[in-house]
Image (spheres, grey):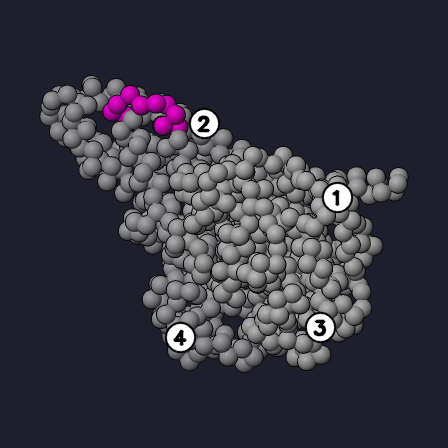
Amino acid sequence: MDIKDFLAQKREVVLKRWLELILDTYPADAANFLRLEKDRFKNPVGHVLTQGTGILYDALLDEKDPDDIKKALDDIIRVLAVQDLMPSQAIAFVFQLKQAIREEAGQAICGQDLFDALSHYEVKIDTIALCAFDVYARCREEVHSVRSSEIKTERDMAIRLLNMLKRSEKQ
Amino acid sequence: MAEEKLKKPEEMFDVSLTPEAGDWMEPAVSFRKGTYCYGAPLKHQRYLDLPNQREWQPGDADWKLPPDWKETILEGMERLIKRHRSFRLFLDICVRCGACADKCHFFIGSGDPKNMPVLRAELLRSVYRRYFTPEGRIFGRYAGARDLTEDVLKEWFYYFFQCTECRRCSVYCPYGIDTCEITMMARELLNLVGCNIQWVIEPASNCFRTGNHLGVPPHAFQETLGFALDELKDLTGIAIEAPINRKGAEVLFVAPSADYFASPHWYTFLGYLMLFHEIGLDYTWSTYASEGGNFGLFHSMELAKRLNAKIYAEAKRLKVKWVLGGECGHMWRTLHQYMDTFNGPADFLEEPVSPLTGTRFENARSTKMVHITEFTADLLYHNKLKLDKSRNDQWKITFHDSCNPARAMGLFEEPRYVIRQTCNHFYEMPENTIREKTFCCGSGAGLGADENMEIRLRGGLPRANAVKYVKEKHGVNMLACICAIDKAALPPLLEYWVPGVGVCGVHELLGNALVMKGGQERTTNLRGEPLTPPDEATDVR
């Protein structure tokens, strides 16, 4: 069997394991909530993790528009970038896909002599990780830019009132 | 973002992504920049004559607590338990069912279990058990009790200043425990040893000095009002008047100070002025009661009462008949739930009656203070205003129920009625994110500082997530709300989570749509943006 068909066949079990590995990085009580609550509005973090990992897995197997990959990464990393995580922890989830594939399909891959073919997909995962680093850096920049734009809005309003004052004094 | 810890060479490749399963009773808080608000500045501590005055920051190792801090806290807890029956009840009756656990926006956004309302309350409850219950005294940890230590105090500070007192959790509590009141009591205790934040103490101090949070003195208030009238003359061609401190007016109008000094609040302020002129309301502003908000509420009941007193005092001095209040959030919790017992009864005022429609605001019979959306919705219901909805056609609008008007007042329909009457495109967010289930902006109760932006973004995620949904589904590009803190906090929040969605007040929408007698043709909205050609279709849901 072709490695691509094989990974497509294993999609659900690999995704389930991948999500478990990601949720294990949260405290147990939080992980339970993120795992069990299916309403996307009650549990937005669980929702983006489930949706985003599915999109990334499909992108791994098929040629996808790079914008779709970046959007999925952005949806996940935008959340992780403001949680209490180191940068390395925030993008670790991408590498955990390798672990999930090896745990769920590694033995069968070895048995069918598909290991060399798998390395091709692992290189693709590394490339997604590099993209993830770019997205993380951009999100952190945005955290600081929204902070500075809030301060700028306050300053602009003060300057606007000051200019009105100057105008009224001239009149 | 967490901070990097230095590792020894042999630990370099010892990486675990699984958090250690610690005991919740062991306080473990790291004050990392971005996750806490700055401490209150000394000059404002002095101005309010607060205890344990000193320069300090929560990130400091030494909090410079007084030697008898522990006794002070425990005596304070005993006093609060005796004084507030609800507090003792809330400490005793929780069965830790967990109904509230996943309802807090900070827990949902952070995944930190100590942000579950039940566990946050346990941080305080465990100390209560240790010193005030027989089982806690005898069995200690086995009865869920723990000693009060400096680390416990720091943990209180960390988590009780990660609660916006929004009361969403209390909606789901089968016992009706108001976890917001637990936070209020915890903050009162922290105040006793001088632990409060700049963004609470400075506005409260300003308010005590000038009557408003921004510290605007009377002459600056008058000038700002004048600037607004100049802008409106350019926009409408009408010379509007706005009386200040006028004795004998029928109505005293009180708004949050951000309305006349911040953006986008300013456009709501213009909307009020246009409305009052158009209906010929016999009213007055006050330079003394120049703030409806009350940051004292985030400090202590005493300070809230002191800051609130000016409203009735000014109503009495100016001999008005009743009081009308602007768009604000926690202002309305204070006015609706506390003012009557803080500083009432206001028996020198009359039951509010709309001078235009004759409607009696029976709900305000006791406080004598009416919310502006109630007042305006009544005017619209009786066809007292001429409107051109198409002036708001550039916006597809959604409405964010601000926590306090929604959960402390039950004010759901009036703002929606005003929006539906003034706009052609209105879309609700999903049912479990609005009305009494509304998600907080994540910046209320004094947390709207800029140094804690990371925490604010976490807390605001559930609200922004629902906005993102209506943006993607309906093309929503404007979020209307009736809270001054929302108007300040939601623009950066949406800029991060849902770029392309702006924030406005309900009376800004009214001001845009209002067709004024003798007014010139308008080419721009209140923001000075050109009006778009009217849409044929309307889509109000």
**Secondary structure of residue under mark 3:** loop
In the rendered image, which residue does mark 3 sit on?
B321
Q: Chain of mark 2?
A: A
Q: Amino acid at mark 1?
A: Gly
Packing grade of label 1 (10 A; few <14, some 14-19, many >=20) is: some
Residue B286: x and y in percent read: 76, 62
Task: Name the secondary structure under disc 4.
Answer: helix
On the image, numbered disc 4 is attached to which residue? B93
Q: Amino acid at mark 3?
A: Lys
Which residue has dot 1 on it?
B237
Kindly report the distance in space between the C-alpha atoms of the residues bearing marks 3 and 4. 43 Å
Q: Which residue is mark 2?
A: A134
* Dominant SS in magenta: helix
User: Which residue is drawn at the image coordinates 63% and 34% (left, top)?
Assistant: B530
Query: Chain letter of disc 3?
Result: B
Vertically, is A144 above or below A119? below
Q: How many angstroms separate mark 4 from mark 2 (CA)? A: 50 Å
Q: Amino acid at mark 2?
A: Asp
Q: Which residues are magenta?
A: A60-70
In magenta stretch: residue A62:
yes
Q: Is residue A63 left or right of residue B329?
A: left
Do the residues at pointers 4 and 2 share their chain? no
